[in-house]
Image (tube, grey):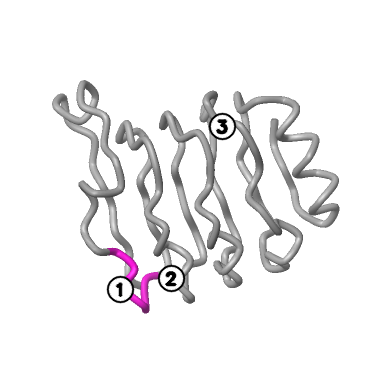
C-alpha cells in the first residue's frame, strides 16, 4: 500500500506551505494513503482529484480554508481527517458523490461544516 507522509519538523511549524511546495503528488496514481496532517499546509493542489486510488487523507491541524474543486473526484476515499482545521470555510463541492467515504474525523472543526457534512453523507460516521 503506497503511503506518503509529510513529517512535521520545527521549520514546518513556522512556515506555511502552499501547494507549490508539495511534490507533484497527483502523478502518484497508485497512492492509497496521504498523511499531510500537522504540516502547516495552507492549500491542497488542484490535481489532488487525480489520485484515483486514494483511500485515506489526513490534513488535520492545517490552516486550509477550502477544498480544491476536483476534490470530489477522490471516489475511492474512505477516510478523511480534518481534525482542528478551524479555518475551513466550506465543505467540498459535490461531497455526496464520494460514496465510499465512511469516516470523517472532524473533531474541533467548525460545527456548521460538520452539520453540513452529516446532511450530505448520512451513512458516514463523522466525529465532532
Q: Name the residue under label 2.
A: 51
Local crowd at mark 1 within 10 Å, few (<14), some, or many (≥20)?
Answer: some
Gap in angstroms between the C-alphas marked 1 and 2: 7 Å
x, y percentage for residue 120? 81, 51
Mark 2 residue element: loop
Mark toward the start of the polypeptide (1 vs 2):
1
Q: Quadrant of the C terminus?
A: top right
Is 92 placed above or below 13 here?
Answer: below
Residue identifier under label 1: 28
Q: Earlier in the sequence, mark 3 or mark 2?
A: 2
Residues packed near mark 3 inside 10 Å, few (<14), some (14 to 19) or many (20 plus): some
Instruction: Residue 29: give x, y in percent of width and height.
Output: 36, 77
Write down the region rendered in magenta: 25-31
Q: Distance between the residues labelled 1 and 3?
A: 26 Å
The relative height of residue 124 versus residue 38 in the rendered view (above or below) is: below
Is 59 displayed left or right of 121 in the figure? left
Residue 27 placement (x, y as % from top left) = 29, 74
Give the labeled residue for mark 3: 88
Name the residue located 58 percent from the left edge and 55 percent from the top edge: 79
Quarter of image, res 42: top left
Amino acid at each position: 500500500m503506497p503511503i506518503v507522509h509529510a513529517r512535521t519538523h520545527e521549520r514546518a511549524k513556522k512556515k506555511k506551505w502552499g501547494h507549490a511546495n508539495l511534490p507533484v503528488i497527483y502523478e502518484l496514481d497508485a497512492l492509497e494513503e496521504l498523511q499531510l496532517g500537522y504540516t502547516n499546509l495552507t492549500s491542497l493542489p488542484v490535481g489532488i482529484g487525480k489520485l484515483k486510488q486514494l483511500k485515506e487523507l489526513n490534513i488535520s491541524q492545517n490552516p486550509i480554508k477550502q477544498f480544491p474543486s476536483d476534490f470530489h473526484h477522490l471516489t475511492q476515499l474512505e477516510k478523511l481527517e480534518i481534525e482542528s482545521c478551524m479555518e475551513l470555510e466550506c465543505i467540498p463541492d459535490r461531497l455526496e458523490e464520494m460514496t465510499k467515504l465512511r469516516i470523517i474525523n472532524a473533531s474541533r472543526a467548525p460545527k456548521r461544516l460538520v452539520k453540513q457534512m452529516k446532511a450530505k453523507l448520512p451513512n458516514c460516521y463523522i466525529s465532532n
